Image: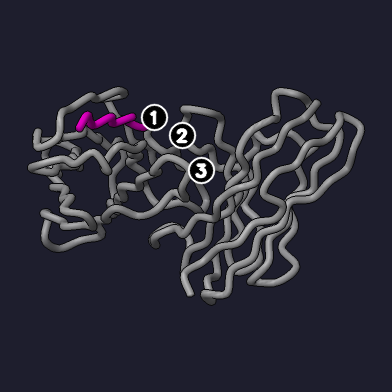
Amino acid sequence: AQSVSQHNHHVILSEAASLELGCNYSYGGTVNLFWYVQYPGQHLQLLLKYFSGDPLVKGIKGFEAEFIKSKFSFNLRKPSVQWSDTAEYFCAPPAGGSYIPTFGRGTSLIVHP
Amino acid sequence: DTEVTQTPKHLVMGMTNKKSLKCEQHMGHRAMYWYKQKAKKPPELMFVYSYEKLSINESVPSRFSPECPNSSLLNLHLHALQPEDSALYLCASSQEARTDTQYFGPGTRLTVL
């Protein structure tokens, strides 16, 4: 089954600090990966996605992620976090098909003003 | 319109009740999903419909019964639930299964007494 793992479960930062959240995938073939964000009290929404092509992907709100095939990684980065980035962040493969994927465990990010 | 709507927002039911959760999207998406999310946990995929064909997660108890009346609607029928089934139930849709971005609804907060 397509699955991903996230190793940073709780991250606490001050505003303007840099952020990097790890995501590793454990499947071969065509690799599509997503980062979703869940702000407090809001819907899960897409932050960014990798399908193919340029391994450096830019998303909303200044986030970016780099797909590194040799490391089976798709880490999320932001050079300077804001208080409003406080949220749960999930890495995920695509859903559906003949197998059941699993979201990453998620990372709870708290940014102090 | 990139909205997935879910009703009701909140539901409280007893263990002998029968209730249904509803989900609707008008984006022309051909894949729809049900997820269960416990507090501080990632969403767990329960069911996938792709072109109105069901893919079943075998770990889902039979007290949960999905239905896809048409490509825009998705129901989750609930019967004889247990208190441990209390959770946020999320509906999502995507253009196609396996490859595309999922759009999530706000969820139904279910409490089983």
Residue B1 is one of the magenta-drawn residues: no
Amino acid tagged 1: Arg
Q: Can residue B87 be seen in this view?
A: yes
Q: Where is residue A47 in the image (x, y as percent from the top left)?
A: 29, 53
Q: Where is residue B35 in the image (x, y as percent from the top left)?
A: 57, 44
Q: Position of residue A102 (x, y in %)?
A: 44, 38
Location of mark 1 (residue): A105
Q: Mark 1 lies on which chain?
A: A
Q: Tell me the SS state at disc 1.
A: loop
Residue B42 is tagged as 2
Q: Tell me the SS state at disc 3.
A: loop
Q: In this view, does A100 lie to the left or right of B11?
A: left
Amino acid tagged 2: Pro
Label 2 packing within 10 angstroms: few (<14), some (14-19), many (20+): many
Label 3 packing within 10 angstroms: few (<14), some (14-19), many (20+): many
Residue sitting at x 42%, y 38%: A103
Tell me the quadrant of the picture where the C terminus of chain A can be found.
top left
The answer to whether dots 3 and 1 both sit on one chain is yes
